[in-house]
Amino acid sequence: MPAEVPRGGAQSNAPPWTRARLRRGLQLFVAFTLAAFLVLFLRGALQGNVSLLLQLPVRIFSILTLQSFLDLLLGGLRLMVLTRAFGGELGLHQATVANGANIVLGGITPSQTGGGPAQLFAMMRAGVSLRVATVTSLVGFLGTILVLLGAGVSVALLRPSFQVPGGFRFFSAGTVGIFVAILLLFLLALPTPALHTGGLRRFLSRLPRVGARLARSQRLARFEHNLGDFATLLRRRGASQWRRLGVGLLLSAGIYLNKFLVAFVVLQGLGTPAKLWDVLYLQELQYLVMYFAPTPGASGVAELAAEQIMRPVVPRQQFAAFVILWRVFTLYFPMLLGTLLMMRELLRGGAPVPDTTSRNGSPTRMVG
């Protein structure tokens, strides 16, 4: 799954990845995925009819393929719209390449730490300034927060007819709590300049034990710096900016609705008469649980969680086919498409890469 949380810093004048990192990340991705399937096999969850994969109707396969393309395209559209909201210029093709880089590198790096820097690199390679690229990514992350917060509220308030394991509600509540804290920071940054001029570090330094260590973190200093850019750019523009921000939020909703609907389409293809609202509810819970998974692309976590979370709507004999198709069209195929776009762009060459260091000389931390 594509990532959109604060990620690691980008390298100056170089892509934010190396062959060794890509190889290691891909190995971890495969290892965690295989380990999860082994656990599922030993638990008897994969005893279903895998031949159902070959019986998938062409119509359903076509819809799922289109949804994978939409995942890439909608993310690119959001980048393009938000970049223009902050005064930058980014074409749809370039924005889609940047989104594809985010999906690919996020998918094969632990906790998806490579996605954000890869997106930043691709945007700057297309001529977007560091400041605009970083704030664009931050605001895209805020859109994701608002959409998933809405999902979290529905998970908390709605009472489905089936039983959901309590542990997953706990994990989803933790994700919602982190989202609320981040959202408050961004909201406070607008009227409170002190928050992004050392105020956050001063506040944390007063907390016992962990606070002092956090206050000395260079990553926190860069986060404060990015908050300042966010507040400045958000305040300086007019009504057209707010319209584009509104469109960006709608695109964020579209991105996640498309992801949630993949599971429903897969179940329709397998002949399972699941209710749309039940599937959407469970997928909201699934993504809240997966969002901060520490493994590359939530590998292992996604498969094991799906076996428990999707149990109310996925018959046991169909789970093997379901989980394979669900992961293929929500992650594996979008990663393949993103890889092809990246390779094509890198082979074409392009403009020199601007310096990706911030004004204070340290690498910038941004969002995926």
Image (cartoon, helix red, strand yellow):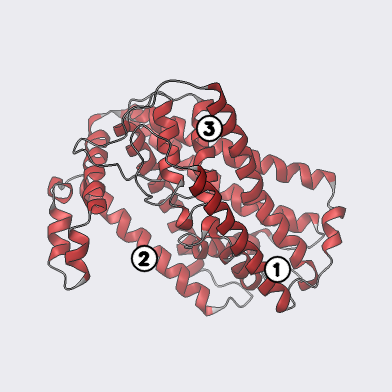
Relative vertical location of residue 346 with respect to residue 310 in this rendering, above or below = above
- Amino acid type for the residue under numbered disc 3: Val
Q: Residue at x 66, y 74 (%)?
A: 39
Q: Are marks 3 and 2 in contact (CB under 8 Å)?
A: no
Q: Secondary structure at mark 1?
A: loop
Q: Kindly identify the residue that appears in the image at 45 percent across and 42 percent down.
A: 17
Does residue 281 show up? yes
* Residue 253 visible in the displayed image: no
Horizontally, is 333 left or right of 92 in the view?
right
Mark 1 sits on what residue? 313
Which label lies toward us, 3 or 1?
A: 3
Query: Disc 3 to disc 2, how far (Cα)?
Result: 32 Å
User: What's the amino acid at mark 1?
Assistant: Val
- What residue sits 78% from the left and 46% below the top? 61
Q: Kindly identify the amino acid type of the residue bearing the numbered disc 2.
A: Gly
Quick one: 26 or 334, which is closer to the camera?
26
Q: Are the residues flagged by discs 1 and 2 in contact, CB closer than 8 Å?
A: no
Marked residue nearer the N-terminal end (3 or 1): 3
Q: Position of residue 188 (x, y in %)?
A: 22, 51
Give the image quarter of residue 269: bottom right
Residue 308: quadrant of the picture: bottom right
**Marks 1 and 2, Cα distance to the nearest angstrom?**
28 Å
Q: Position of residue 190 (x, y in %)?
A: 21, 44
Q: Is residue 20 above or below residue 268?
A: above
Of helix, strand and loop, which one carries label 2? helix
Give the structural element (helix, strand or loop) at label 3: helix
Mark 3 and mark 1: span between their CA atoms?
A: 35 Å
Residue under pointer 2: 177
- For the residue pair 70 and 38, the one nearer the viewer reads as 38
Q: Badge 3 is on which residue? A: 97
